[in-house]
Amino acid sequence: MSAKKIELPASIVIRDLAQKIEKSPIEIIKKLMTNGVMATINQSVDFDTAAIVVAEYGFEAVLEAQDEVVKEESGEVPLWRRLIADEDTKALIARPPVVTILGHVDHGKTSLLDALRQTDVAAGEAGGITQHIGAYQVEKKGRTITFLDTPGHAAFTAMRARGAQGADIVILVVAADDGVMPQTREAIAHAKAARVPIIVALNKIDKPNSNPDRVKQQLAELELVPDEWGGNTMVIPVSAKQKQGIDDLLEGILLVADNIDIRANPLGKVIGTVIEAEVDKSKGTVATLLVQNGTLESGDIVVAGRSYGRMKALSDYKGRPVKKVGPSTPVAVMGLNGVPAAGDVFQVVDSEKEARAIVGERADAAKTAANVQKKISLEDLFANFKAGEAKELNLIVKADVQGSLEPIMSELAELGKGEIGVKVLYAETGNIGENDVMLASASKAIIIGFSVQADVAARRLAEAEGVSIRLYDIIYRMTEDIEKALKGMLEPVIVEKVIGRASVLAVFSASKLGRVAGCRVTEGELRRNAKVRLLRGASDIVFEGEMASLRHEKEDVREMRTGFECGVGFKNFNDIQVGDHLVCYVLETSS
Ligand code: GDP
């Protein structure tokens, strides 16, 4: 019997693969595991892997025909672009370009955004007092440019990555005195993934030690060849501080905008991206939305992520009330019943009923995904893993938001191209829990946490099992660290070793010592010069620091062993309660 042919794309999400061959995702995940591939229902596998799986069910996979552009670059076309592509081309008209500014920390992103904002003379406002809503607009030559003004975090944030997704043009700020740095590369990767053209703002040219040619050379090496060297990347010298070159930059933006298709249908389906959202005590959810197609009007029912509501109190980036806004326009709105995430797509629907149905479906999908993930037996994972005994660095990656995972995974993929591979057992959002540690322990993996924390139980287990947990806030720090690990050069890190635990049975007031916890040591020992943490309830840490005193029957002591009672005072802390738990630990170096 000849195999049935089935068309598969270059990469496919497990859920979709399962649907295509009408099997349960769990079955597919198990099949993948027996082939040594760990994947969750929401992760995708490449064509070759999918082909092996479907072959087991009697299918012959053929690569789906794709259009050239899609094949050439990695990353996904943002949903809003796909939707605009579905619009009737006759209905599309030009809209303002949406620009986001990316670059290495301290290269001048914030300063440049400020300088650009001040060029908005049309408003004629002294001091340019504008409301911060995460986006603003500037007029140049009678044309409007929309800037996404992401918060000036030093660390890379998901917002910045997503900014590239919502933008038509990325301005890459590179300081002329510093050159290409890790976050510059990161920014280039985001822009490429989002298929957004890059204009380089060569900043700080006022500095005596600036070296524009060196930077251009570096950029050329990264396939951003300056136009003056025959390439097609605009490199515009500016000084955000002295407000030089700002007009050139604006003109550059309009020039690039003219060369790409920046259009939308103001009468079409209303869709866009959430720029930021927060809860205001008196106003409820206040969100900034960037309309990308259609016209958003007061009274429209919007679904954004897993929240929905009737839009009211629309206002522009200057805080002025507006009734409706068209494509490429940022608008602050009220009325959502929850807080969507920055980067979520929003859309207008016909009724609240429809909105509820969409939100319900999304909640169900998330629940199913979570259940399926839980059901993957750890034993299966371990067994597979051990069988391979590959020479690879195994990682478990946890990050705060999905948007952080994407750039982390692409960095890790790069790193894994060397002699020693990097294998990500799984990557998910959320804090590090016991499950993660168990898996890491059995598979000799390191846990990487990005802008997340390890909960108390996980920390305890990690310590008992000798699992290394590494926490980062900045991607390039993580990259550097892993690079070192791969070279076997990882510097020792400081880890916590618990040496004792005690329960608080009573609280005393000692005139000289402040309040003192009357404790019984339940495990190990307490040491006067070690560190202590006071826990309340399941996991609340109410104090972390040093002891001010350790006494046994009015005698100062250096240590106190299991079974004994003692008084413990804490440095600058008095809020002790009966029932609190005390953990005593030392910091040790480990690799
Ligand atoms: P960001 O971290 O990329 O947002 O960078 P900032 O805008 O906060 O700028 C970092 C530092 O560089 C600040 O001290 C700025 O004053 C300084 N800076 C920014 N642009 C220029 C410039 O064009 N020339 C000089 N000399 N300093 C600049």
Image (spheres, grey):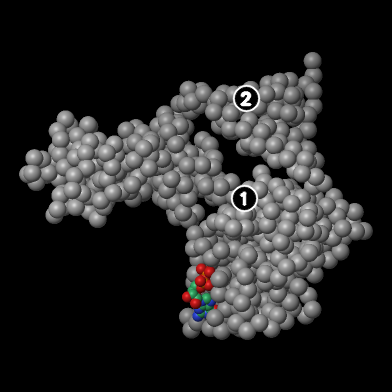
Quadrant into which the N terminus falls: top right
Please provide percent x and percent y for residue 216. Answer: 59, 72
Quadrant into which the C terminus falls: top left
The residue beneath circle 2 is: 26
Is residue 298 or residue 186 the one in the foreground?
A: 298
Q: Is residue 564 above or below residue 314?
A: above
The residue beneath circle 1 is: 339
Please provide percent x and percent y for residue 383. Answer: 48, 23
> Which residue does the image show at 73% across and 40% down from the upper left?
356
> Which residue does the image show at 51% across and 42% down from the upper left?
430
Instruction: Name the mark nearer the viewer: 2 or 1.
Output: 1
Q: Give the side of residue 484 with respect to residue 99, left or right.
A: left
Structural crowding at the residue carrying mark 2, measured as other residues with C-alpha within 10 Å and reported as few (<14), some (14–19) or many (≥20)? some
Is residue 250 or residue 64 the one in the foreground?
A: 250
Q: Which amino acid does label 1 sit on?
A: Val
Is residue 36 or residue 560 the one in the foreground?
A: 560
Q: What residue type is labelled 2?
A: Ile
Q: Is mark 1 on a helix, strand or loop?
A: loop
Q: What element carries label 2?
A: helix
Structural crowding at the residue carrying mark 1, measured as other residues with C-alpha within 10 Å and reported as few (<14), some (14–19) or many (≥20)? some
Q: Give the side of residue 106 with respect to residue 488, left or right.
A: right
Q: In this view, does 377 lie above or below 258?
A: above
> Which residue does the image show at 55% across and 26% down from the upper left?
376
Residue 385 shows up from this direction: yes
Please provide percent x and percent y for residue 357. Answer: 74, 38
> Which residue does the image show at 12% across and 44% down from the upper left?
551
Q: Give the side of residue 351 with respect to residue 427, left or right.
A: right
**Which residue is at the far right?**
90
Compute the Cα span from label 2 to label 1.
32 Å
Residue 555 image label: none
Q: In this view, does 121 lie above or below 292?
A: below
Please provide percent x and percent y for residue 120. Answer: 68, 79
